[in-house]
Image (spheres, rainbow, N blue to C red):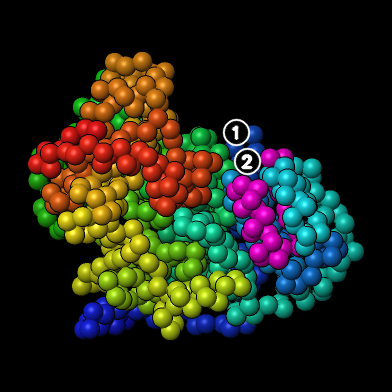
């Protein structure tokens, strides 16, 4: 891939930039991605939908036909170019069908997370000025209807569960192809393509105005940069992350641009069977998914009396991959062990994930070197990336030809990243959003000229690989003046199979503490493997000595990675879980730190009520 880096150091500024590979087309909009794909490969299987125990392919031509038919339905229903339409639904084929149909009708989709509360739905639809809303399931409709009186601009509520999409399509038969062509070509690159509201880990969600050029230029350049992943013959992926989030939305458009066959699985509990039947060549996932796969395999091995074998295999996998990355010699003994474990362990895990996965794109949180190296030894290269809604998802990503485990990769073509004051990551380029919707104050606050200030802190190595070290607003300063990045402690603790979530506390306090929740899915298996009643409640488990000892073990591992002043001295295991439904996690499973700090203020206070001997780590 032709590229030039401009790395500049001086006056506390480090900057890396890669020029765009694909020339910009200011007149292009998102619909051109599908139109171009139709010209190139009309008969290509662009999607697959569940059909019995297998999958039924849908060609580019068939998808395009369905898109145009539904776009005609929106036009017949009175939707005008520029109108905003809310959409609350799970990750299914119909999600992308509606997405493109709205683009072809000239409308602007406003995605709503399927778990959003009625109050959030009301805010997003009213703030965006949506004139219509599409709801997939009865529960989605109920939440919309519960605030219907507040939605003064909404003229239509279409319910997918009552077949309204087919009704719309049937009603649009009199709309001409020329009218849809007129509508789909009205928008140019600088026009708004979608209005995505941030998940709101802090404060009220803000609407990010993403333009057609943001999507078109980023997908075209990413197609080239990630060609070994998305352009290989027979490339396919199974989407299960919510398409309302920019991460999966971008990938779904990239797949159309690159001709990747895409399937959908909205129920993550059915993910493994779906992977087994779909057999994708690459995956899009968040680190928690990889942690679940690893922990489930470990606990299954433990239950079968093969726990020691699995852990030895995992250790060999990490060592083998680490030595390869560092360019060190692989000893004969390690080669023999690796070959043995490949037959006994690694091959079974590969098969469980469908058997064809070569790459996985991971984002939203740090994966950690251990899991990165483990899956690399399975033959799955996890390409960690970094980005936000405001950067149309990726700003940096590890490439199949240029990857370093433990980093989030180099900058993508058409993107520049620099480190500003306090090593804050700032982004400029084809992917940076236009503005916050009707919020000029927030827009002005987050930009320094053309540079978007992410609020994240990072560092570059000499080759331009970025590492995320924390969030600027989340840095804890202890009473002793020590700066502590919570993620450095939280991520390794969260890797433990029985740990659900972690929040490190200690701002202006004498030492660092932590709130811990247990993973209700993994806990029964772990309890059974450790001679405990598998039906133990979360409240009982939180007080159980064996459970507390296991959590302490996880904390000890994390503490070993930081200085003594940064180490966790006390922790509390909560008897409840943090979920998206409880309001403590965002849709991409990130913790809402400010909400947790408020809701569990008493538990945090209890950590510091009784002084600890700061020379010893102790349980609370």
280 in relation to 228, above or below? above
| Residue in the picture at 34% in, 49% down | 380
User: Is residue 136 rendered to the left or right of residue 489?
Assistant: right
Relative depth, front residue between 18 and 429: 429
Magenta stretch contains residue 231 = no
Q: How would you rate the neighbour count of disc 2 (Cα within 10 Å): few for under 14, some for 14-19, many for 20 or more? A: some
**Side (left or right) of 281 relative to 61:** left
Circle 1 — which element?
loop
Left-right relation of 208 to 282: right
Q: Nearer the viewer, residue 178 or 37?
A: 178
How far, Cα to Cα, is label 1 from label 2?
7 Å
Q: Identify the residue position indicated by label 2 in the image.
A: 50
Badge 1 is on which residue? 53
**285 vs 186: above or below:** above
- For the view shown, which residue lies furthest in the right direction? 174
Residue 233 seen by the camera: no
User: The magenta stretch spans which residues?
Assistant: 116-139
Please say whether residue 173 is visible from this viewpoint.
yes
Residue occupying image coordinates x 28% and y 26%: 547
Residue lying at 17% horizontally and 38% vertically, measured from the top left? 612
Q: Splitting the image into 4 quarters, where does residue 213 fall?
A: bottom right
Give the image quarter of residue 225: bottom left
Secondary structure, mark 2, is strand
Point out residue 458 in the picture as x, y percentages from the top left corner. Answer: 29, 66
> Which quadrant is the N terminus positioned in?
bottom left
For the view shown, which residue lies furthest in the front direction?
Answer: 609
Q: Between 56 and 76, which is closer to the camera in this rendering?
A: 76
Q: Which residue is depicted at the point 9% across and 46% down?
A: 331
Residue 127 on the magenta segment: yes
């Amino acid at each position: 891939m032709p590229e030039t880096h401009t790395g500049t150091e001086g006056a506390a500024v480090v900057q890396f930039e890669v020029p765009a590979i694909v020339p910009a087309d200011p007149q292009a909009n998102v619909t051109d991605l599908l139109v171009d794909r139709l010209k190139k490969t009309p008969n290509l299987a662009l999607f697959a939908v569940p059909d019995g125990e297998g999958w039924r392919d849908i060609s580019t031509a068939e998808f395009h036909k369905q898109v145009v038919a539904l776009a005609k339905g929106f036009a017949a229903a009175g939707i005008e170019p520029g109108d905003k339409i809310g959409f609350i639904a799970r990750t299914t084929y119909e999600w992308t069908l509606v997405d493109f149909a709205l683009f072809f009708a000239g409308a602007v989709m406003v995605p709503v997370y399927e778990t959003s509360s009625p109050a959030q739905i009301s805010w997003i639809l009213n703030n965006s000025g949506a004139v219509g809303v599409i709801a997939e399931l009865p529960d989605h409709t109920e939440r919309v209807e519960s605030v219907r009186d507040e939605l003064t601009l909404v003229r239509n509520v279409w319910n997918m569960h009552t077949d309204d999409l087919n009704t719309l399509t049937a009603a649009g038969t009199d709309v001409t192809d020329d009218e849809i062509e007129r509508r789909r070509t009205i928008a140019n690159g600088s026009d708004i393509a979608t209005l995505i509201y941030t998940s709101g880990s802090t404060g009220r969600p803000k609407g990010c105005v993403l333009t057609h050029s943001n999507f078109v230029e980023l997908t075209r350049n990413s197609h080239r940069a990630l060609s070994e992943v998305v352009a290989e013959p027979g490339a396919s992926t199974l989407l299960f992350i919510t398409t309302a989030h920019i991460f999966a939305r971008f990938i779904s458009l990239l797949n159309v641009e690159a001709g990747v066959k895409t399937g959908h699985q909205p129920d993550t509990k059915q993910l493994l069977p779906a992977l087994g039947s779909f057999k994708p060549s690459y995956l899009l996932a968040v680190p928690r998914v990889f942690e679940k796969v690893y922990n489930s395999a470990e606990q299954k091995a433990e239950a079968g009396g093969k726990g020691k074998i699995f852990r030895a295999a995992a250790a060999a996998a990490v060592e083998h991959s680490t030595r390869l990355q560092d360019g060190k010699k692989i000893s004969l003994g390690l080669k023999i062990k690796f070959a043995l474990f490949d037959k006994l362990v690694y091959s079974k895990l590969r098969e469980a994930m469908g058997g064809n996965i070569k790459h996985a794109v991971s984002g939203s949180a740090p994966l950690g070197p251990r899991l990165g190296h483990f899956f690399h030894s399975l033959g799955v290269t996890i390409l960690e990336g970094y980005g936000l809604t405001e950067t149309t998802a990726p700003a940096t990503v590890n490439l199949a030809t240029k990857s370093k485990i433990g980093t989030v990769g180099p900058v993508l073509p058409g993107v520049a990243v620099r480190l500003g004051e306090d090593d804050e990551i700032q982004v400029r380029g084809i992917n940076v959003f236009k503005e916050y919707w009707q919020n000029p104050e927030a827009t002005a606050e987050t930009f320094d000229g053309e540079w978007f200030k992410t609020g994240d802190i990072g560092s570059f190595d000499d080759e331009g690989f970025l590492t995320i070290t924390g969030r600027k607003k989340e840095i804890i300063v202890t009473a002793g003046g020590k700066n502590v990045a919570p993620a450095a402690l939280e991520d390794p603790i969260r890797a433990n199979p029985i740990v659900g979530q972690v929040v490190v506390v200690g701002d202006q306090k004498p030492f660092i503490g932590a709130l811990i929740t247990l993973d209700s899915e993994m806990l029964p298996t772990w309890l059974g493997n450790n001679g405990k009643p598998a039906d133990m409640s979360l409240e009982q488990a939180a007080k159980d000595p064996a459970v507390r000892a296991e959590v302490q073990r996880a904390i000890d591992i994390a503490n070993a990675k930081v200085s003594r002043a940064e180490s966790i001295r006390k922790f509390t295991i909560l008897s409840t879980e943090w979920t998206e439904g409880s309001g403590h996690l965002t849709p991409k499973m990130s913790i809402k730190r400010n909400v947790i700090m408020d809701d569990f203020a008493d538990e945090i206070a209890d950590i510091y009520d009784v002084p600890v001997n700061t020379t010893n780590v102790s349980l609370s």
